[in-house]
Amino acid sequence: MTITITAFERSPDGGKGLARDTRVRWALEEAGQPYEVRLVSFAAMKEPAHRALHPFGQIPTYEEGDLVLFETGSIVFHIAERHAGLLPADANARARAITWLFAALNTVEPPILDLSTARIQEHDQPWYAARLPLVQDRVRARLSPLASRLGDADWLDGTFSAGDLMMVSVLLRLRSSGILNDYPNLADYVARGEARPAYQRAFDAQLAVNTGQPPTG
Amino acid sequence: MTITITAFERSPDGGKGLARDTRVRWALEEAGQPYEVRLVSFAAMKEPAHRALHPFGQIPTYEEGDLVLFETGSIVFHIAERHAGLLPADANARARAITWLFAALNTVEPPILDLSTARIQEHDQPWYAARLPLVQDRVRARLSPLASRLGDADWLDGTFSAGDLMMVSVLLRLRSSGILNDYPNLADYVARGEARPAYQRAFDAQLAVNTGQPPTG
């Protein structure tokens, strides 16, 4: 059955790979699964036809036969569960990899998203400069223990997993802030993720959309 | 094998059931699994012994034989995967229930947590009152489409699932704000969750800890 995902017709980041379809593309590339992409405009995303697929009016969605999924974490997990390459076979190692997937989304990403939201939506507010250090401290409060746990390992728990895919994707959002430079092992970890051929293919495919060139994938 | 979870020695909410161990207790009660609880003080939570279980120095954790998990979503999913009662048997329905689990944690909870964080950590800041409506609007931007999708159904997708367990748990955090009153079907949905015998047992067990009485469970 054909897998079809949705992505921004034009990503707000202009192709930096931070839109969430990149995470799903990366998972599909790691799993060696071909996929099609339906591009959606900001206006169409809020229309009933798209909300029938994604109640919150966002991208990405995932369609495969009768199955319709939304929510990036769920889609990546679905791909990881059905194809080799993203979850270890050992039951305990698998449960721990899933733990990192949730930790990336529910513990590490929220303060990082707050930082983006402050920058984008509150930049002109009178409190912006005074409040920014608070938000940055909340990000650091997650990065410090994450850096301690990672130590000098390549990945968070043994071999590369869906948990690493999501953690690297979440940390990538920090690059423009410069905060990642204070955690060299996390910066290296992100670079290791980006160096994976599957990531490169995913990145190039979303870039092709955003530069108006046909995807090469 | 004995299941052992960790919980606050004294919950910051004084036993309102909003600490995340309640979510895990609820899942274990739905699954009919007995469990033991190890209480952890705020100081001990940040010590290396606890951080070996939970890198971010929080509760709950989950131990079962050699397996150690942290991150509430992951623990609830682990319980749901291994025992009946929290995920449908049909593959597509199961994937959709998992989608709601992720949606609760990554799409609905973050703005709700921002609202709590603003109230707790920024209440004395000069910008608090001016910024509050922005944060409330971000919560409403999630609740409106969620209410539309739920409609007059009992649960988000057919029968009660781990997705509902997590969504109800996330929405419960809003009760004191009064915002939930503007979405009567969501308020009813939360009440339906709270009325489940498994939730009641979980709530009572955490309350017993926080009122200094021995758990009755």
Image (cartoon, coloured by chain):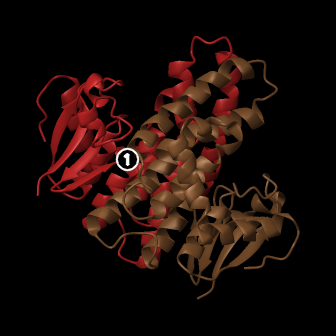
Chain colours: A red, B brown
B115 lies left or right of A181:
right
Name the quarter where the C terminus of chain A is drawn: top left
- In depth, the one of B61 and B164 nearer the eye is B164
Q: Position of residue B127 (x, y in %)?
A: 73, 19
Q: Quadrant of the N terminus of chain A?
A: bottom left
Chain of the residue that carries numbered disc 1 in the rendered image: A
Q: How many marks?
A: 1
Residue farthest toward the right in the current orientation of the protein: B212
| Residue A85 seen in the figure | no
- Residue B217 vs B57, above or below: the answer is below
Q: Position of residue A106 (x, y in %)?
A: 53, 49
Is B183 placed left or right of B49 in the picture? left
- Side (left or right) of A58 relative to B199: left
Instruction: Give the amino acid at mark 1.
Output: Glu
Q: Which residue is mark 1?
A: A71
The part of the image, by quadrant, that contains residue A67 is: bottom left
The outermost residue toward the bottom is: B1
Residue A119, above or below A94: above
Residue A175 makes an appearance in the image: yes
At horizontal 46% and vertical 74% (from top left) the residue drawn is B85
Residue in view at x 60 percent, y 28 percent: B135
In the depicted structure, whether residue B72 falls above or below residue B30: above
Taking the spot 86% from the left edge, 65% from the top edge, the residue there is: B211
